[in-house]
Amino acid sequence: MKAENIKKAVQYRKLIDVLLDSNQYADIVLKDGYVINTVTREIYEADVAIKGEYILMVGDASGLIGSKTKVENVRGKFVSPGFIDSHMHFESAMLTCTEFSRLSIPTGTTTIVADPHEIGNVLGVHGMQEMIKEAKTLPNQIYFTVPCAVPDAPGLETAGFDVNSSHMEELLNDPYVQGIGEIQSFSNIGPVYENAPELIDDLVAAVSYAESIGKTVEGNAPALFGKELAAHIISGGGHVSCHETTTKEEMMEKLRYGVSVFMREGSSQRNMAECIRAITEEGMDSRRAILVSDDMVPEDLLKDGHMNDIIRRTIAQGVDPVEAIQMGTINPATHFGFKDVGILAPGKRANIAVISNLNEMAIDQVYLNGSLAAERGQLTIDLGSYTYPESVKKSVKRGPVKVEDLHITANGSRARVRSIVAIPFQNLTGAQEFNLNVSGGVVQPCLQQDVLPLIVVERHGRTGNIGKAFLNGFKLQSGAIAESVAHDTHNIIVTGTNYEDMVTAVNRVISMDGGIAMIKDGKVVGDLPLRVGGLITDELSGQEVSEKIAELTRLAKSELGCGIPVPFMHLSFWSLVTSPEWKITDMGLIDVDKFEVLSPVVE
């Protein structure tokens, strides 16, 4: 028997004694609150009694109050299970697990399921294990769903390390690993089946191993219907999730197929309002509708909250508050098989959010493992700080580039070019051709048409590739922005109004060992070093990162004239080759649907 099972048995035996021995009492009683029952979808007045890490009972707990019992009067307030974020990436917030938790716990989020495929693409198994090691130091429940295929599209992109089914035994047997993360390698069903069937074989092998040891598998099925959706579900072992659902029609078909639809509502990609229509308009059952953030910036966490804000937005779409809370508590707990969270009931972990205003999801108190962890937006526990080892730093393994390395060349005085078209608040993109001027053999940006060069520079020291394309819709008026955050392989992505500022921005990122750099007229407008894998900083607090990103965002608009919201997160997703239509990697412009590399200039 495992040590944790023995420990739990001892704790449960003590709970029984407290309940049945008239001389033993609860540690804490939340008195006279309105309990939110996530199983029966009820609200009723009851006490919640806590002993140690666990809930003793929900009901009349007056007999469990002794002289040393701390009684919290929560009359008029709502008592809910702590919230669960079922799919997110710490790397997208550019924060360590510790700093993300520092911002997240006061908002009522007590359980997180994180996908570390960002750091896995840069640093492989070692990088993921270092992140898991950090999570083990924290009091909130953090689990991981790890990638079984890195990179997602071999031959179309270059990652820092390769991960496949052979690594699953090493990763999946960690108790903090919930299962396999989003299976992006089989998102583009047709092209993968025709051009890279070996990816399917390796995926099925990884999934089979995961199932054999009781682990879950998460899907990734953007715009998949019918046979293709069925194939994706089967590749994941028969039950998967999908956080890439963007339309009501997708939502309906996936729910009918038994998919757990992770309705994404993050900082740059917001799909819940469209997905929820399947429930509010079509009356579909919401048991497999789950709210997730996917990608959050620190400023949004501080300003608006985490899962409480997403639940608030869901209520605003006409969903009953208790049903919306179910989507962030019992629904994900059921999906993952979490037996100790998601419900207020005897023997469950005492992870609790006390809510003062239900429709606004205003969080008054947060209890974590039976202890008060936050009150009125402030932590009441000390999380300390966390510093990563040098082994996950120094991840940029190439020297400076020259301006001519970035040039997109063409003959004549005019060139017809292929351009990715940005779609705000989506990682989906469009595809369009434009006519641009050519000077000295180099295709020039065109601010009038809002068409700029978009370049990806391989930074892992494996190929030295530089991929080239154009971008429409970034609304940049001057200068350049580069960053080492570029999903999923996280090479250096850069766009700008001139090649000179672009090369300066790229070289600034290289000199910082990863991060964000903005350049105008050859000078640094603003930057942020991200030395942990070129993705995360362990040098700043969550508050400091929030302030820094807010400053950079302001400068992007005021100094560079950038007109797209959340510019750094949007830029990072234009290299994501697992979602349609055109994307860019270090290999070049990628036609996602055809699984092929295109020339940026139409021949």
Image (cartoon, grey):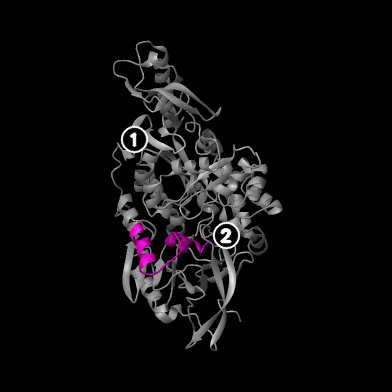
Amino acid residing under circle 2: Ser
Q: Check if mark 1's residue and mark 2's residue have beta carbons within 8 Å.
A: no
Which region of the structure is painted magenta? 549-576
Asked whether 51 or 453 is in front, the reply is: 453
Q: Secondary structure at mark 1?
A: strand
Whether residue 150 sits left or right of residue 398 in the image: it is: right
Toward which corner of the image does residue 49 lie, by quadrant?
top left
- The image's mark for residue 373 is 1
Q: Earlier in the sequence, mark 1 or mark 2?
A: 1
Whether residue 540 sits left or right of residue 275 in the image: it is: left
- The image's mark for residue 72 is none
Whether residue 471 sits left or right of residue 536 in the image: it is: right
> Is 556 colored magenta in this rendering?
yes
Q: Secondary structure at mark 2?
A: loop
Q: Position of residue 296 (x, y in %)?
A: 43, 51
Residue 132 vertical placement versus 11 (above, below): below
Residue 80 vertical placement versus 513 (above, below): above
Residue most toward the top?
22
Toward which corner of the image does residue 531 lie, by quadrant?
bottom left
Asked whether 87 or 75 is in front, the reply is: 75
Q: Which residue is mark 2?
A: 579
Q: Position of residue 101 (x, y in %)?
A: 37, 44
Amino acid residing under circle 1: Ala
Asked whether 163 or 559 is in front, the reply is: 559
Q: Position of residue 93 (x, y in %)?
A: 40, 53
Q: Which residue shows up at 43% across the image and 27% down it?
A: 8
Q: Which residue shows up at 42% across the image and 34% down it?
A: 357
Q: Could you tell me how far apart the alpha carbons at marks 1 and 2 are, in whole angstroms?
A: 39 Å
Residue 336 vertical placement versus 487 (above, below): above
Asked whether 527 or 140 is in front, the reply is: 527
Query: Looking at the magenta stretch, what is its main secondary structure?
Result: helix
Q: Quadrant of the C terminus?
A: bottom right
